[in-house]
Amino acid sequence: MRIIKAKDYDAASKACANLIFAQVVTKPDSVLGLATGSTPIGTYEHLVRLYEAGDLDFSQVHSVNLDEYKGLDGDNDQSYRYFMNEHLFSKVNINKEWTNVPNGLEPDADKACSDYEAIIASLGGIDLQLLGLGPNGHIGFNEPCDEFVKLTHCVDLTESTIEANSRFFSSKDEVPTKAYTMGIKTIMDAKKIVLIATGRNKAETVKKAFFGPITPNVPASILQLHPDCTVVLDADAASLI
Ligand code: F6R
C-alpha cells in the first residue's frame, strides 16, 4: 500500500486526479470504478479541467460506480447516477451508454446485484477503482459487520451512515435506508485501487483502517491486502499516522 500525503484538499484531489489521468493515458479504454460522496468532487473537477485542456480523452472509457440507493431514480437529484452526471459524465466526452451505476429502481435485489456483477464481468473487470472512506470505515456501502460480503449486494444502511448522508437531504427521514453496493471481492478484484480521504474527521478511521488489524468491523482495512492500492490523504486525514 502506498500513501500519498498531500498538503490540503486541493492538492489531494489533484494527486488523485493525476493517478486516474495516468491510468486513462496508458490505457485509453480503461474501465474506471467510480465513487460518489463529497470527497471525490475535487478529483472530478480536476479531471474535467484536464479534459477541457485537451489532455484527457474519455471516449473509450467505460465506468462502473460503486453503489446506488435502492428506490431512487437516476433523475432524483440525490441519486448517485445524478451525482455522476452532474460532476463528471455531463462535463467530459465519456459515452453515457458506457457509464454504469447499480439500478436503484430494480425492486428485485438479487436481480439488481447479479445484473451488476454481470456488467462488470462483461467489461473484463475494473482497471482502477476510486474509493472514498466512510467515517465508520465503510467502502462503497460495505458497512462494519462480522464478515466481509463478497459480491454486489443490498445493504441496510447503518444509523451512522444515514446520519452522515442526511446532510444531502432536506430531512433525515428522506434518506433511503437501503442501497446496492459492490461487495468487498468486487472491489478487491480491481487491478488498481485509489482511495481518497480528507479532513480531520477521517483521521481516526485512516489510522484504524490502514495501520490497525484487518477486520470486517473496519471494512477498508481489507485494502491492506490489495497488491496495488494507493491511499491519498490531506494533512488533516494523515494527522494521526
Ligand atoms: C460513495 C461511497 C461511500 C463514500 C463514503 C465517504 O460512492 O461509496 O463509501 O465514499 O461514504 O463519503 P464522503 O466522501 O462524503 O465523506
Image (spheres, rainbow, N blue to C red):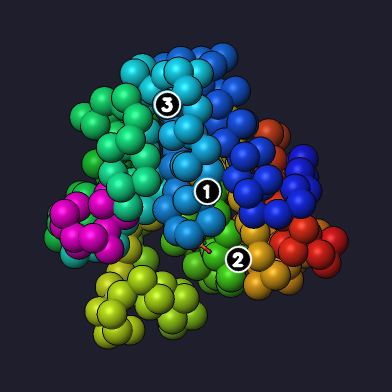
Q: Residue furthest right?
A: 241
Name the quadrant of the C terminus. bottom right
Q: Is residue 77 left or right of residue 29?
A: left
Q: Mark 2 and 1 residues: CB-CB less than 8 Å, in contact?
A: no
Q: Is residue 180 left or right of residue 131?
A: left
**Residue found at x 44% / y 34%:** 48
User: Which mark lies nearer to you, 2 or 1?
Assistant: 1
Q: Position of residue 65 (x, y in %)?
A: 38, 44
User: Which mark lies nearer to you, 2 or 3?
Assistant: 3
Give the vertical position of 49 relative to 171 (above or below): above
What secondary structure is marked by label 1? helix
Query: Label 2: which residue?
Result: 137
Q: Nearer the viewer, residue 106 or 172?
A: 172
Res 9 quadrant in image: bottom right
**Residue found at x 60% / y 66%:** 137
What secondary structure is marked by label 2? loop
Q: Position of residue 237 (x, y in %)?
A: 72, 62
Residue range corresponding to the magenta coloring? 72-82
Residue 5 in the magenta stretch? The answer is no
Q: Is residue 215 left or right of residue 21?
A: right
Kindly identify which numbered label has been placed on residue 52.
3
Query: Label 1: which residue?
Result: 42
Q: Residues within 10 Å of mark 2 (few under 14, many from 20)?
A: many
User: Which mark lies nearer to you, 1 or 3?
Assistant: 3
Q: Position of residue 230 (x, y in %)?
A: 69, 40
Q: Earlier in the sequence, mark 2 or mark 1?
A: 1
